[in-house]
Image (cartoon, helix red, strand yellow):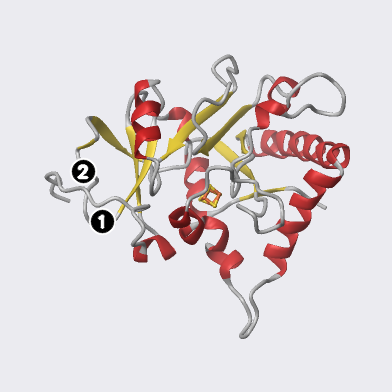
Amino acid sequence: MKLLSVGNPKTLKGMVQGYNTYILHLAPATLSGHNTCPKATPGCIAACLNTAGRGGMFKKGETTNAIQQARIRKTNLFYNDRDAFMTLLVNDIKLAIRQSAKLGLIPVFRLNGTSDLSWEKYEVLNTGRTIFEFFPDVQFYDYTKILGRKVSGIANYHLTFSAADGNDMDVIRAIAQGMNVAVVFGIKKTLAMPESYNGRSVFNGDESDLRFLDPKGVVVGLYAKGKAKKDTTGFVKYPTIMLKAA
Ligand code: SF4
């Protein structure tokens, strides 16, 4: 079983900048029977990227597919046989480092492609080290809805807080703590992002997925895509402030 995948349309943009993003997709929320997203909201579950692209293509009358089943298998492995999972993860990261070197690219890793696990809490194979300590020269990054994760001392892990329906207070706290906050805006791609949101400048996060390169102290604006375009929960934000001309 391979855990990591590479090359969705957005991460491909990062290749132009010299980076190769490898993503771990687990089954989000409680889809596998295990809760991988403790702060998931009705709106984010409905709009989750888990069903973007081929992951959301189902044969007529079916509600699952090979991609969804693979994500559930990986998630079950994580919970049922942690050593086997970590062995695969370590091997996949080593392989990614070798593959990227051949391509002249810098490998970077998103372990929460479709989950929100606190990776800083998990040990790699009785080594007493987290995955970040196991690969100290490698950059990891994620989005999270969990406020207060203990990552400030981890130099090679970057977190962007995710706004959603019903976590406005956490957004304010995350901004106060100096985190960048990702916000999905319900505006057309032909329009520019709003200039500011919640008192912060908005940075266009759709130009690439390389969140660790973003300027500090910004709102990372994302255009609503897929199911998010039909959101009515408050997950997608509709800025009332002046929009810049496209
Ligand atoms: S927290 Fe993220 S990964 Fe989990 S259901 Fe919500 S959008 Fe999907």
Task: Measure the alpha-carbon separation of dots 1 and 2.
Answer: 9 Å
Image position of 80 (left or right of 14): right
| 237 relative to 174, above or below | below
Q: Earlier in the sequence, mark 1 or mark 2?
A: 1
Q: Amino acid type of disc 1?
A: Ile
Q: Position of residue 4 (x, y in %)?
A: 70, 46
Q: Position of residue 117 (x, y in %)?
A: 63, 38
Q: Which residue is tagged 1?
A: 187
| 22 relative to 28, above or below | above
The label number, if any, that marks residue 194 in the structure image? 2
* Mark 1 closeness class: few <14, some 14–19, many ≥20 residues within 10 Å: many
Determine whether label 1 and label 2 are within 8 Å by CB.
Answer: yes
Q: Residue at x 65, y 46 (%)?
A: 36
The label number, if any, that marks residue 41 in the structure image? none
Q: Position of residue 184 (x, y in %)?
A: 35, 49
Quadrant housing residue 58:
bottom right
Mark 2: C-beta under 8 Å from nearest atom of ligand 1: no
Image position of 234 (left or right of 141): left
Q: Amino acid type of disc 2?
A: Pro
